[in-house]
Amino acid sequence: MSRVIMSNAFTQDDFLCGCLVTDSERKIVYVNGYFEREWGWTSALLLGKNSDSLFTRSSCIFYESYIVPVLSIQKRFDEIQLALLSAKGERIPVIANARLNNEQDLTFWSLFSATKRDRLYEELVEARNALHEQSLALKALSITDELTGLLNRREIKHRADVILNLAKRTLKPMSLLMMDVDHFKRINDNHGHQQGDEVLQALSQVLQQVARDSDIVGRFGGEEFVLILPNTDAACAQVFCQRLHKGISAMQVTGGPITVSIGISSELIGQKTTFEYFVRLADAALYRAKLAGRNRSVLYSEHDSGQ
Ligand SMILES: Nc1nc2c(ncn2[C@@H]2O[C@H](COP(=O)(O)OP(=O)(O)OP(=O)(O)O)[C@@H](O)[C@H]2O)c(=O)[nH]1
């Protein structure tokens, strides 16, 4: 059975929203008790004042330029996001519904505090930003080698394919270096695996220092590294390798001095030069560098094709 409540048993002050009435000059002609209770505005402070004193500067501009014309045409406006000022000057986000009564030339407003909604929105934005950062971190993890922080094998191939595709028609030179640490097993055997890891890390730093930003430096696996030098012919690649040997020999690590052997493949990029092709040639040259006594760089030549 429904319960009938006498209308004089409650007032607009009992509603959980701010009720506001403004006239055609935007003067405040009514506010309910919610304004004082929640936002510190007594009716004495507001009545007769321009409603601009209730809103932030940007909300006033929005009110003037958008709400007023829309109200005059549509007569009502739902769920407007505005920022109200409390009597103390605090910014309060509110959602407002407004209805224009043409006969009375009055606008009736109901204003709902949206503080919690705003906080929820901020939390959503924070969560989205955190997710974005996590996905960037995951992406970085998926392309790097965990031990050295260099690019991993899959990413080296991916980047090489991009360079090769871009340079196909321009016939630019590219060099690929396959580098292997000499007698690395001895370092592990004599000083332990942990020390071996530290050597690989120190070595990676030297590679990054010697390489240009445009070069691709990666760990191919184990104690094998790959460097791709775009726009670099054989002569320049050999000069680069000499700098590498010098930098590596100056490394201060337990188990040192460290030396490396490098196989170089240098080709003009054409329709048929794939990453695998460069790797095959550099591998053959590396094999010859090891055979020739290690601690050296060898440029691939036709002679290696029989290896
Ligand atoms: N510490 C460490 N050792 C590794 C890692 N990956 C591979 N190795 C070791 O690298 C060594 C490679 O040894 P070999 O392939 O025999 O070659 P090498 O001793 O470097 O000799 P040459 O290449 O012929 O000069 C092995 O002992 C592997 O266990 C790694 O991530 N960390």
Image (cartoon, rainbow, N blue to C red):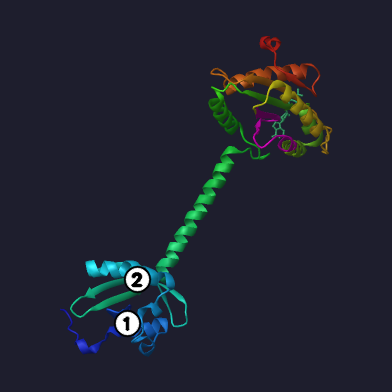
Task: Point out which mark residue 44 bears.
Answer: none
Q: Quadrant of residue 246?
A: top right
Question: Within 10 angstroms of label 2, few (less than 14), some, or many (20 or more) residues?
Answer: few
> Which sits earlier in the primary sequence, circle 1 or circle 2?
1
- Point 45% across, 66% down: residue: 119
Question: Within 10 angstroms of label 1, few (less than 14), some, or many (20 or more) residues?
Answer: some
- Point 43% across, 80% down: residue: 86
The span picked out in magenta is: 206-229
Residue 218: say if magenta: yes
Residue 261 position (above or below residue 209): above
Q: Nearer the viewer, residue 110 or 281?
A: 110
Q: Which residue is mark 2?
A: 64
Residue 284 position (above or below residue 230): above
In screen coordinates, is 73 left or right of 153?
Answer: left
Image location (x, y in percent) of residue 49: 36, 84
Whether ligand 1 has any atom under 8 Å from the Cβ at mark 2 is answered as: no
Residue 212 position (above or below residue 1): above
Q: Is residue 232 visible?
A: yes
- Point 64% across, 19% down: residue: 267
Ligand 1: quadrant of the figure: top right
In screen coordinates, is 74 left or right of 292?
Answer: left
Q: Nearer the viewer, residue 177 or 287?
A: 177
Secondary structure at badge 1 equals: loop
Q: Quadrant of residue 32?
A: bottom left
Please, what is the three-letter code of the amino acid marked with disc 2? Glu
Image location (x, y in percent) of residue 144: 61, 38
Q: Which residue is mark 1?
A: 27
Residue 9: say if magenta: no
